[in-house]
Image: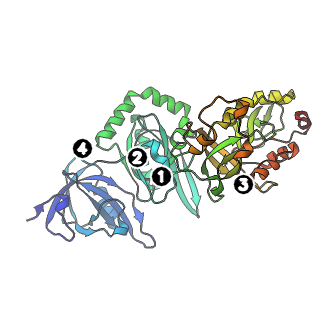
Amino acid sequence: MTNMLSIRDIAPNMKNWCCIVTVQEKQQVTDSMGTPTKKQKLIFYDSEGSRVEGIIFNADIPKMSPVLQVYRKYKISNADVRSIPPKFQTSDLTVQWVITAKTVIEEVSREEDIMPVKFTFTEFADLAQYMDDKSKSVDVLGVVISSLEKKTITKNSKQSNVQKFVLLNEHSQTVMLSLWDDFLNNEGQILVNTIQAYPVVIGRRLKVNNYNGVSLSTWFDSALLVDPPIQDARELKNWAMRNTKLIASLIETKSYIKYNPQLFLKADQKTTLNCNVSLSQKTTLVKAKISFEHIFQKYWYMSCAKCNRATAADYGIEFTCNSCKQKSPAVPRCRFDVDLSDDNGVIPASVFGDLAEKLLTFTALEAMDHFNQNHELPLEFAHNSLKTKTFLLHIKPIQTQLADARQRYTILHYSELEQGFDSAQSLEQPNALPISSEHKIDAAQLLAPEESSSGSKARLRLSDKFDEAEITATDDVEPATKNSNKRTKLR
Ligand SMILES: [Zn+2]
């Protein structure tokens, strides 16, 4: 006679029990590190909301895994009950049931009940704090509105498939979720097939990456719950159905492909001090003031409108780009150098495109017109207003070494911090006084003593300036070409 028990009453090594459980989630089949063992983990819950891990090994996986479908209810008897050693615990679960080909499993009903399980989701806006932290993973809830092309990547001579899906939350924020390998074959396929119906997913134990701001990715122990029977998911789906116009416009403008500063550049973000910025990091966040008053430079270069690479073509002339091979007219693109300074040092950086125009308060076209007429850009306003501001900046080292051997950076994105956020700043700049020449802070005062000379020395000569720009290449942006006949005009 077997006893009908609830999950929490079933202790390790117990025999003669049965329990009615629902499959909450199923992970992908994984290899155990350094052994030929394969395993697949599941999570079961019962009507009390208690949960237990299920685990299937090796040859039992193809037999037993298809028997246990997510969100369905089963009567399970006499699985082998074990404690999970702490180092193998991936969640708060401490007991596992080993499901083998001998385990007795009967499906109870196919009706989906609302899961009594409470998930703790990380808001999209809070994801950044977990970025690139290998010890942390997150649970998120989102509606899948679109997918990008599937790609095959070869890493360490092993091929992997990856596809990005766009998750949307009810604050209309988007974040990209990369599904890898088995996730693509299983849940990914369901998402692709049902994408018109706004599938809602719960991503469990996802990794937060630093790509275009913030992005998510599946990991070895992640799980994806597609359209799970829980209240939050149903509400989100209903929200999506009511907001089809918004979703259609997001899909059309593909705004999710762009950098998502609203998720990433937040005032409370953990940043690196200038003196600690290191090349080993692919990208870094710093909190700093921006200045370029002391740098004599051109502010624009002629570029390919398609790929932003520099060209010698004249403005408006249609040409075939040597980089992207496309035909388009040459357009001026804004680009200039700035110093990023905090109390600990100064970092030279370059800023491009829209971000640069916003700082300059002039468009590339205006900068070009002034240059061509040999007029200096009136920058007093821009310089003065920068002195009152502190920025959060996402920067990336430039590979090329410069003549002065100082590492330069490209500004990937920046956002202005609220006045008074930075206490160091409010000391130097007594509240928001109207800016007049008396209140100007000499940029040099902000430089650390050992930096103040080298910070601007290398740039004093315009010829150096443009030569320097020539080799300051980055992945996605190309600097000014040498334009020697214009050089003399700007004196
Ligand atoms: Zn091009």
- Label 2 and label 1: CA atoms lie apart by 10 Å
Mark 3 vs 4, N-terminal side: 4
Instruction: Kindly indicate whether the residue at mark 1 contacts the one at mark 2 (C-beta within 8 angstroms).
Output: yes
- In the image, residue 429 sits, relative to residue 370, either above or below, namely below
Instruction: Kindly indicate whether the residue at mark 3 contacts the one at mark 1 (C-beta within 8 angstroms).
Output: no
The answer to whether residue 463 is visible is: yes
Residue 314 drawn at (x, y percent): 84, 32
- Looking at the rendered structure, the kind of residue marked 2 is Thr
Q: Quadrant of residue 14?
A: bottom left
191 relative to 12 in the view: left or right: right
- Looking at the rendered structure, the kind of residue marked 4 is Glu
Count numbered badges in the picture: 4
| The disc label shown at residue 28, or none | none
Image point 69% across, 34% down: which residue?
439
- In the image, residue 381 sits, relative to residue 7, either above or below, namely above
Mark 1 vs 4, N-terminal side: 4
- Looking at the rendered structure, the kind of residue marked 3 is Gln
Q: In which quarter of the image is residue 368?
A: top right
- Label 1 and label 4: CA atoms lie apart by 33 Å
- Label 3 and label 4: CA atoms lie apart by 55 Å
Q: Mark 3 points at which residue?
A: 399
Choose between 158 and 316: the one closer to the eye.
316
Report the mark closest to the observer, 3 or 4.
3
| The disc label shown at residue 112, or none | 4
Q: Name the residue under label 2.
A: 122
Q: Mark 1 points at which residue?
A: 130
- Label 4 and label 2: CA atoms lie apart by 25 Å
- Looking at the rendered structure, the kind of residue marked 1 is Tyr
Q: Residues within 10 Å of mark 2 (few under 14, many from 20)?
A: some
357 relative to 216 in the view: left or right: right
